[in-house]
Amino acid sequence: MTLLLVAAGAAVGAPLRFLTDQALVRCAGRRLPWGTLVVNVAGSGLAVFIAVAVAGPGWNALLAVGFCGALTTFSTFSYETLLLIEDGRGHHALANIAANLVGGLAAGLAGFGLAQLF
């Protein structure tokens, strides 16, 4: 049953990641990987919030592991960072790394703090 909950959450999270990226490409262009940054930061905060505030392993499997796990993406973050380096934009690559790591951790802390209010 847990596997089905993870799969159901992922079935929503992965397309949402794709759609978010496509929307941000239309708004901001492809110069920087804004879509990946947004889903990674938002997903980090949401996953920690869910893990702390939501009771029950089923909900955690569906939302934190399935949905947030598919919404966020370390592989695309790595790939896009390497593309920036290959394109000779090492300073953008470093900024991308810092933004994803610091942003994700800050969002996780915010999610934890918000969950403590519930």
Image: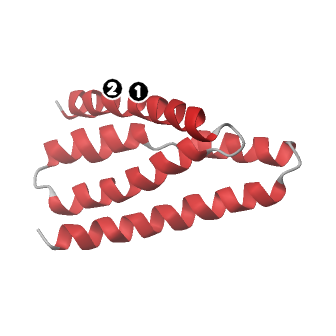
Q: Which image quadrant: the N terminus?
A: top left
Contact between labelled residues 2 and 1, with CB atoms less than 8 Å apart: yes
Query: Residue 99 placed where, x, y %?
Result: 59, 62
Q: Identify the amino acid type marked 1.
A: Pro
Query: Residue 25 placed where, x, y %?
Result: 59, 35
Label of residue 95 in the image: none
Q: Is residue 83 left or right of residue 20?
A: right
The residue that mark 1 highlights is 15
Q: Residue furthest right?
A: 88
Q: Identify the amino acid type marked 2.
A: Ala
Q: Secondary structure at mark 2?
A: helix
- Looking at the picture, tell me which residue is in the foreground, 81 or 20: 20
Q: Secondary structure at mark 1?
A: helix
Mark 1 nearby-residue class (10 Å; few <14, some 14–19, many ≥20): few
Q: Is residue 68 left or right of residue 61?
A: right
- Looking at the picture, tell me which residue is in the foreground, 79 or 33: 33
Q: Residue at x 55, y 44 (%)?
A: 36
The residue that mark 2 highlights is 11
Query: Residue 16 placed where, x, y %?
Result: 39, 32
Mark 2 nearby-residue class (10 Å; few <14, some 14–19, many ≥20): some
